[in-house]
């Protein structure tokens, strides 16, 4: 085989050369366990893993582990989960006790919280499922709930990247009920009002005509108020993959909750998905989005995508005091080339520009990448987006006033 993925030229002869017997079955079960833990591994990677095992053999454990990791691990955050799954699946008795303990109530001590969360996901995928509940009527047991806590409160603060499959499903159901209250802004049109700032001449003359010479009170008008349009630009690059998949459920909820919400995805190109998200069924909507997007989990060209938005979409979407919501980690493959100019143009076209960045979940975050430094001076609010609590605070960021143009604002943002 020359070029392309290892399975691209796999024929009957190649399939005949794959490992047989218990080894192939064990590799297949191991890949299924990783998929249950949340790793994006499918049939193609399973065949690649079997070919890698056939190439390196099973004489040395380290070579065997490295071959599987090279095929099945595509992101840095998946490596810790793979390492624990490998040690457990290929028989490390000490880790089995640690994984079983992860199912007990957590009290984070010497072990870090992130390590225990990875162990909990692994335990949920590898340990046998609990037996179904008995048909007998349950016995009534009285418990004192004074010192207990709701699992929903825990999910509010838990990072999307560390949730188990069951927790992600629960969070998606909670996202479907989220609402984004945008403040109403005065528009050019006026409407009738008992106490307004302008006299309604037409209604006043009508009253005088029907008053038969009697004095008629004046009619008044005031400026109408309407929620501004909301334009969402969401990054779907490889570094944003886990968060973008969860945020699509949030975007589906707000798109179906209010009018004049426009959603566009960008990675290496710009893709509008508003009409796909209008479908009431979230599964159907996301299936249409997946069919429409060609650059999911690829690279990031923020400057080029913003340039296309400013050229093709800005004038039709950012009118009437629109609010722009930018969801990205700011890691640009073009090293910020032309990004400052496009960000300045975007900021001047909308009433308020809010940037949501999952990297802000880290306490020691610093604006060192060139893309982040180019974008920060032109945003009105810079907030994290990594859990439900951060999403609920987006409304407060959108309710802020217009930006204050001050030369020191950019300097303070880059400190």
Image: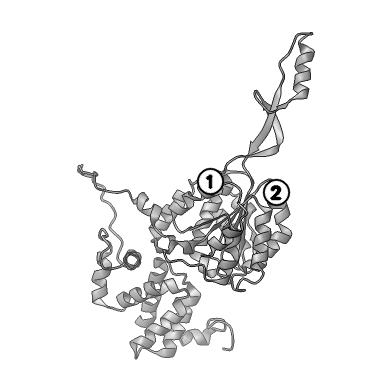
Query: Which residue lies at the image location 48% right of the left edge and 50% below the top edge?
Result: 393
**At which x and y percent is residue 172?**
46, 53
Q: Nearer the viewer, mark 1 or mark 2?
A: 2
* Quadrant assignment, res 354: bottom right
Near mark 1 (Cα within 10 A), the count class, few <14, some 14-19 or many ≥20, is: some
Near mark 2 (Cα within 10 A), the count class, few <14, some 14-19 or many ≥20, is: some
Q: From the viewer's perspective, is 366 left or right of 225?
A: left
* Residue nearer the viewer, 49 or 234: 234
Most extreme residue toward the bottom, as rendered?
Answer: 59
Residue 188 seen from this side? yes
* Quadrant assignment, res 86: bottom left
Real-space Cα distance between discs 1 and 2? 20 Å
**Which secondary structure lies at badge 1?**
loop
Q: Which mark is residue 180?
A: 1
Query: Which residue lies at the image location 68% right of the left edge and 55% below the top edge?
Result: 348
Query: Which residue lies at the image location 39% right of the left edge and 57% below the top edge?
Result: 158
Q: Which mark is residue 319?
A: 2
**At which x and y percent is residue 122?**
34, 67
Residue 269 seen from this side? no
Q: Which mark is residue 275?
A: none
Picture mark count = 2
**At which x and y percent is residue 248?**
54, 56
Query: Which residue lies at the image location 51% right of the left edge and 45% below the top edge?
Result: 179
């Amino acid at each position: 085989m020359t070029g392309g993925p290892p399975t691209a030229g796999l024929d009957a002869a190649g399939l005949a050369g794959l490992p047989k017997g218990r080894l192939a079955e064990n590799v297949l079960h191991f890949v299924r366990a990783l998929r249950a833990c949340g790793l994006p591994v499918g049939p193609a990677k399973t065949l690649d893993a079997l070919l890698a095992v056939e190439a390196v053999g099973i004489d040395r454990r380290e070579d065997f582990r490295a071959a599987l990791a090279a095929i099945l691990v595509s992101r840095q955050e998946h490596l810790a989960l793979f390492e624990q799954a490998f040690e457990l699946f290929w028989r490390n008795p000490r880790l089995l006790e640690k994984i079983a303990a992860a199912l007990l109530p957590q009290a984070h001590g010497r072990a870090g919280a992130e390590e225990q969360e990875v162990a909990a996901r692994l335990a949920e995928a590898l340990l046998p499922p609990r037996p179904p509940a008995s048909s007998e009527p349950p016995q009534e047991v009285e418990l004192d709930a004074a010192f207990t806590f709701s699992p929903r409160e825990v999910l509010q603060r838990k990072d999307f990247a560390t949730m188990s499959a069951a927790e992600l499903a629960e969070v998606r159901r909670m996202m479907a009920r989220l609402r984004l209250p945008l403040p109403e802004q005065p528009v050019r049109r006026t409407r009738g009002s008992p106490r307004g700032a302008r006299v309604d001449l037409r209604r006043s003359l009508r009253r005088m005509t029907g008053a038969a010479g009697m004095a008629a009170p004046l009619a008044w008008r005031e400026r109408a108020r309407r929620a501004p349009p909301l334009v969402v630009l969401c990054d779907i690059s490889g570094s944003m993959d886990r968060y973008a998949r969860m945020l699509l459920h949030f975007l589906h909820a707000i798109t179906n909750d209010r009018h004049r919400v426009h959603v566009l995805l960008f990675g290496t190109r710009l893709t509008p998905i508003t009409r796909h998200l209008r479908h009431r069924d979230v599964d159907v909507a996301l299936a249409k989005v997946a069919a429409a997007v060609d650059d999911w989990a690829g690279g990031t060209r923020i400057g080029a995508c913003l340039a296309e938005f400013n050229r093709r979409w800005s004038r039709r979407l950012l009118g009437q005091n629109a609010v722009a919501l930018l969801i990205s980690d700011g890691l640009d493959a073009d090293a910020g080339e032309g990004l400052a100019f496009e960000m300045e143009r975007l900021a001047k076209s909308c009433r308020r520009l809010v940037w949501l960045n999952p990297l802000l979940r880290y306490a020691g975050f610093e604006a060192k990448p060139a893309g982040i430094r180019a974008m920060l001076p032109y945003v009105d609010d810079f907030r994290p987006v990594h859990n439900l609590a951060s999403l609920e605070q987006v409304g407060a960021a959108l309710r802020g006033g217009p930006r204050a143009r001050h030369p020191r604002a950019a300097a303070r943002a880059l400190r």
